Amino acid sequence: MRLTFLCNIAGLMLWRSWRTTAVLSFMVVSAVAALVFLSALAVGTNDAMIRNSTGLFSGHIAGSGIREADAPLPQLPGVKQVLVRRQQQALLSANGRLEPVLLMGVDPAQEQATTAYWKKTVAGAFPTAHEEALFLSQETAKRLQLSVGSRVTLVNPQGAAVKPLTVAGVYKTGITQLDQGLAFCPVGVLPTGPTELSIAVFLQADAPLEAIAAQYRRLLPSAVFTPWTEFMPDLKQLIDLDSICMAIVVTLVFAIVSVGISCAFLIFTLKNLREHGIMKAMGLLSGDTALLLVAQIGMLTVAAAVVGTLVGAATVAVFAQIGIDISAFTSHNQYFSVSGVLYPRLTALALFTPPLAAVVFGLAAAIWPIAAIVRKNPADILRSV
């Protein structure tokens, strides 16, 4: 009964000073909405970096040490595509020059349907399935003085010419591992000889990375399966750093907002000092006075946080459909080599952390006004007004 009475009084006091309530509410609503959107944008940025890095060539899980008898691998739940690649060391000879490359035999149709490195073509085109042709990096083509349509001889490690090939296309990804010492050809073009099998596993959105990697390890214990978090540790650290920075931003914003709420409610309390003195003279305990102030700040903060969350979620829903193009700022960034479009994505953490932080810091803001009023006795309060 007492709590209900204090909440009613708190609501009436907020309504009585509706201008102050509106200003403070707007401050909390705007902060929560902005941080919900920024949190979702941070998640979308992480998604884009993962999508660009894994979708370019490597996939979410890289497999090596695969035996011929084990290919093709089974398609597990959550797996979108498994690309099998055969590779061998070779030498390319042209214009009196030799260039060592790792020649990778691929299925052109599957590669074009799943990966994006072929989209980084700067001249020519990706070879077709039965074309006796190579897809070279720009650096390799420059060193061999080759262009699209040029003839190049494939030489085995013993130095004997194996077969002539045509340069079908030249690419540049901006990723050192792909632009140095790597060449692609249809799998049927590979010369006879020992080859190594590797796979690239591409997962569906929100598929459990570690769980699927563990399943493949159980199916093929002799092979090595490495999730992207291990062969791209720099990207994982960047995402972890992004999460830490977002947590710092949320804390700093609401620390500042709570100071504003605390100052406003201190003025609010001093403005209503006479009413507080009368209520204390009528028998309202110090604990009840503190509870009254907590109820005022709590009601305002919770209501504003709910509205701010809805506004932020609605904004995320809009931009999740149209995306945010930052290509002009990521032209030299390897983590955005495929696409510079961000799609904000709401997660439970992104949705609930800002409003919860607003409520926690809002309640902490009640400490100063409570300390200012609780330590005064009714006689001192009434004499001072």
Image (tube, rainbow, N blue to C red):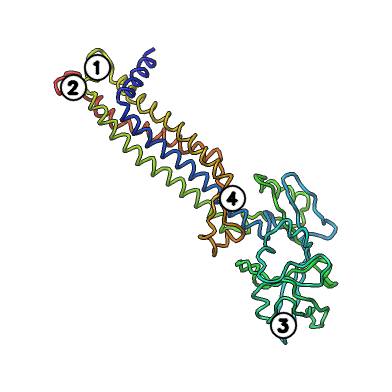
In the rendered image of this protein, does residue 354 appear above or below residue 145? above
CA distance separating discs 4 and 3: 41 Å
Kind of residue indicated by mark 1: Lys
Disc 1 element: helix
Q: Position of residue 252 (x, y in %)?
A: 38, 44
Kind of residue indicated by mark 4: Asp
Kind of residue indicated by mark 3: Leu
Q: Position of residue 374 (x, y in %)?
A: 25, 24
Upstream in sequence: badge 4 or badge 3:
4
Disc 2 element: helix
CA distance separating discs 4 and 2: 58 Å
Q: Are marks 1 and 2 in contact (CB under 8 Å)?
A: yes
Residue at the image position 61 percent from the left and 69 percent from the top: 176
Q: Which residue is mark 2?
A: 381
Q: Which residue is mark 1?
A: 280
Q: Are marks 4 and 2 in contact (CB under 8 Å)?
A: no
Disc 4 element: helix
In the rendered image of this protein, does residue 207 appear above or below residue 363? below
